[in-house]
Amino acid sequence: MNIKQLHYFYELAQHRHFAKAAKACFITQPTLSASITALEKSLGTELVVRNSQFVALTQAGEVVLRHAERMLLEQDAMRQELSLFGGALSGVLRIGMVPQSSIDIMPLLKRFNDAFPKVSLRLSVMTHGTLLEQLDLHQTDIGLGFDELLTEHQRRALDVQLRHPNPMALLGPPHLAPSQPLRLADLQDLPLILPSATMQFRRYLDEAAARQQLSLRVVLETDSLFHLANGVSHGLGCAVVSAGIAATAQQLFKLPCHPLVDASAGTIAFITRKHSVTPAMKAFLALLQA
């Protein structure tokens, strides 16, 4: 067994397809298949259920995957630390965030890039649940999610920093003066474009409306922030978004923005693991505290 075999196995587990995994590893499919077979032989057990293509991981394969992820992370952490001997931190920093956040992460990424230009940044948008899962599996390094949704068990394993309120706002309608504060009751007669019901932000909104016994008129639901803003710009309706997203949309698309004074999507915070912290993660966390 060697690191290269574990890397190939990890890519196969991610892509669930031999040809796609081989392409991601920049090798041929026969080479990938031979490497997986050699790994299985060295470990004395089958890791993959397959016929002519990938079918699933065996139970042993799931165990090997968990360890492979951590071993590959440690290898990356080692390379990052060794890069410091050359005078400049290098490597990859993977950041995950929920779709509706009042924190504008781009200025932070710009500051980090200015300070550590050799560290490649990867930003992914995902649900809060997926974010926590990927932090646990070491697939994400830094998360931007909902603080109050963490369980006590999760708080013991995770570090939470830079908590920030996540107020809501309304994009549109054009006939109201920009920045005029509104209440949820003011939205009852408006055509609304809302995030999909499966999104945590929408759940906060629905709970706030239910507490006030309000019925909202929904003309479009979408999990795309672009289509929320684009729907407003085409006159389809008004969109309820986080105040941070509203401020960005107002700047980029010249859409009127109105704070909702009685609605909030909880508290947003940066979340990281307490253990297996890479030099790039430490550098980003230090930037948050600066």
Image: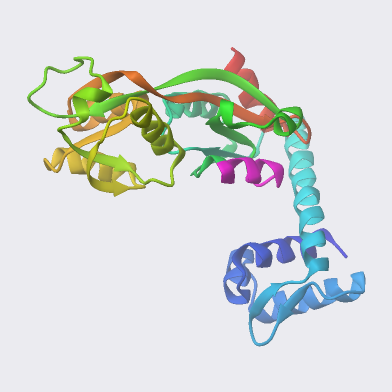
Which quadrant is the N terminus positioned in? bottom right
Return the residue found at the far bottom: 52
Q: Where does residue 290 sit, x and y in percent of width and height?
A: 59, 12
Residue in view at x 63 percent, y 71 percent: 22
Q: Which residues are magenta?
A: 129-139
Residue in view at x 78 percent, y 36 percent: 276
Q: Where does residue 89 sit, x and y in percent of width and height?
A: 67, 32
Residue situated in front as seen by the camera: 60 or 52:
60
Asked if residue 196 is positioned above or below residue 59 in the image, the reply reads above
Q: Where does residue 256 sit, x and y in percent of width and height?
A: 17, 25
Asked if residue 86 is positioned above or below residue 4 in the image, the reply reads above
The answer to whether residue 206 is magenta is no
The quadrant holding residue 74 is top right
The answer to whether residue 130 is magenta is yes
Asked if residue 219 is positioned above or below residue 155 in the image, the reply reads below
Residue in view at x 77 percent, y 34 percent: 81
Residue situated in front as seen by the camera: 59 or 184:
184
- Position of 178 compared to 288: left or right? left
Residue situated in front as seen by the camera: 244 or 201:
201
